[in-house]
Image (cartoon, rainbow, N blue to C red):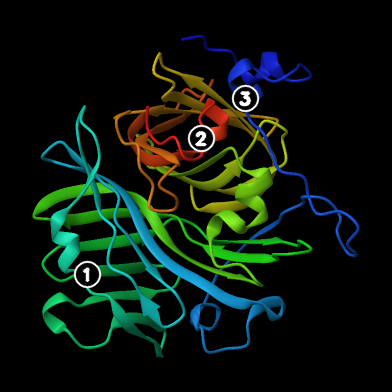
Amino acid sequence: MTVTSLDALRGQPPSPALGTATRGRAPEGRKFYYGDTTLIGVFDAGVADLDRSRPTPYGLAPLWQATYGALRGESGNYYMPVRFNHVSMTPRLHLPVTPLGGLSADAPEALRSFYGYTTNDVVGDRWLLSSRGKPDRGFSLDVEPGKVARWVENGILDLTMVQTGSAMQMYHPDPEHDWYYLATVCEISGHVLGDPVVGAGGWELAWSNGSLDWRELPVPRRCEDIWMIYVTHYADGGVEGAALYANAQGTGVGKLTTDGTSAALRGLRSEVDLDADRTPARVRWSDGARTWEWTAENPASLTSPRNPSYIWMFGSCRELGSDREIVSSYGYAEVLPRVVGRDETEGPA
């Protein structure tokens, strides 16, 4: 495996791994298209921003709400639970389980999880999303914006999600599928299938026009090479958390929270190192001034609830050149198949 620093790559052609990426062309001949530019901001979201019954941003239609985590269990298993809610209905919980060194498989317990109509309520300063009926297999997400949430799937998981820094908002104008997105970064602890877990994740809401699937949107179609969320604790008491997408062209965006201060990031550049089986082993991303490196902890985690052809892995992240001692770091990276030279339908190697 060859490791090349981003500093050495600046101003030079992309590395061979990045050179495998391909992108569809943006629609032509349409008004009000200014190229693939994603607007990014950070803000302190309140319950009004999470209430799906209020007027929608930019006049877009609600697309999805999702709650998710990338988790390591004391048993040695890795979990990536995700619960999608499409306006007022939800499919079953998706729960890939990956033993250390093994392949991912959906937990059979998820087959008995709730699906059907949901409620979406604001009660005081809390946002509540929950199942309607079927209490033996119900679920709930109870959020205090800017603070903490509790996610419960009866008989399957019970997770506490502590928000790291401000919320993030993205807006991507597009001739076909405008996209607005609100997301958080959370440190997670609790239990999955009785296994004590820690990890990172969050909850998110998305709005669009005309699209029904993530893969139709401009970011995954043309802009994204990797998507990453992580939380790192330092020995000096500091905490760093990030949510971002990055690409070889340096047009990615994201949010970085360092010791309580959140900032929007633009111009993010990434590169990927591959193992012999074309599995990503290291991912580096840079904002132009600093470079971070994410390392896979369990490279066998090869399925993503966002898109089964994505490659996702649990791992840790550090800033290159920093002498801050790390106590813990966990999160996940999603890498598109095109970045590692795979066809979208090919699946894991």
Q: Are there few (<14), some (14-19), or many (20+) residues within 10 Å of tag 2?
A: many
Judged from the image, the secondary structure of the residue bearing numbered disc 2 is helix
Whether 347 is drawn above or below 196: the answer is above
> Is 313 placed above or below 119 here?
above
Tell me which corner region of the image, top left, top right, bottom left or bottom right, holds residue 177: bottom right
| C-alpha span from label 2 to label 3 | 10 Å
* First along the sequence among labels 2 and 1: 1
Instruction: State left or right for residue 58 relative to residue 282.
Output: right
Q: Is residue 232 left or right of residue 190?
A: right
In primary-sequence order, the first of circles 1 and 3 is 3
How many numbered callouts?
3
The residues bearing labels 1 and 3 have C-alpha atoms spaced at a distance of 41 Å
At a point 51% along the width and 9% down the height, the residue shown is: 2
Up-down relation of residue 127 to residue 269 (above or below): below
Residue 152, numbered label: 1
31, above or below 101, in the image: below
* Nearer to me, 144 or 228: 228
**Other-residue count near label 3 (Cα within 10 Å), few / some / many at <14 / 14–19 / ≥20:** some
SS at mark 1 in the image = strand
Rendering coords of residue 184 (x, y %)? 47, 60
Q: Amino acid at mark 1?
A: Val
Which residue has dot 2 on it?
A: 337
Q: Are marks 2 and 3 in contact (CB under 8 Å)?
A: no
Comparing marks 2 and 1, which lies closer to the viewer?
2
User: Mark 3 belongs to which amino acid?
Assistant: Thr
Assign the C terminus to one quadrant of the image: top left
Q: Amino acid at mark 2?
A: Pro
Q: Position of residue 223 (x, y in %)?
A: 67, 44
Residue 342 image point, x, y percent: 50, 30
Q: Which residue is mark 3?
A: 20
